[in-house]
Image (spheres, rainbow, N blue to C red):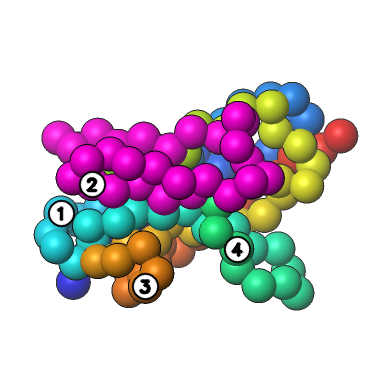
Amino acid sequence: QVQLVESGGGSVQAGDSLRLSCAASARTFANNVMAWFRQVPGKERVFVARINWNDGSTNYADFVKGRFTISRDNAKNTVYLQMNNLKPEDTAVYYCAAGMYYWKYNYWGQGTQVTVSS
């Protein structure tokens, strides 16, 4: 069992930056891939970015490319999402997820709210 704890959300102005953190209770084969998703009320949860613990390879949704960066700190079992040039449409609850494969996430954090005002 892997537990994920997110932090770093908040309310900012358009153009500002935020860094989200996701601390994993352990690193095992079960959480080889770590990812961020986001969800707004009434809509499905959507993929934002993912990273492979082992080789650090990353992948991003088109709508965040060039603005968001996902990274990891192996020593701290923590994954980060650096969000720059935030836009009002980035407002959502951001969730950290972990899984063995990038197409299946078995563990989810509790979510952290990000609100961007214009």
Q: Which residue is mark 2?
A: 53
Q: Which residue is mark 4?
A: 46
Q: In the image, which is nearer the foreground, mark 1 or mark 2? A: 2
Q: What residue sits 34% from the left and 54% below the top?
A: 34
Vertically, is 2 above or below 73? below
Vertically, is 27 above or below 105? above
Q: Which residue is mark 3?
A: 104
| Amino acid bearing label 3 | Lys
Front in this rendered view, residue 27 or 32:
32
Mark 1 vs 2, N-terminal side:
1
Q: CA distance from mark 3 to mark 4?
A: 13 Å
Magenta span contains residue 60: yes
What span is colored magenta in the figure?
Answer: 49-76
Q: CA distance from mark 1 to mark 2?
A: 8 Å
Mark 1 vs 4, N-terminal side:
1
Mark 2 vs 3, N-terminal side:
2
Q: CA distance from mark 2 to mark 4?
A: 21 Å
Residue 71 image-quadrant placement: top left
Q: Are marks 1 and 4 in contact (CB under 8 Å)?
A: no
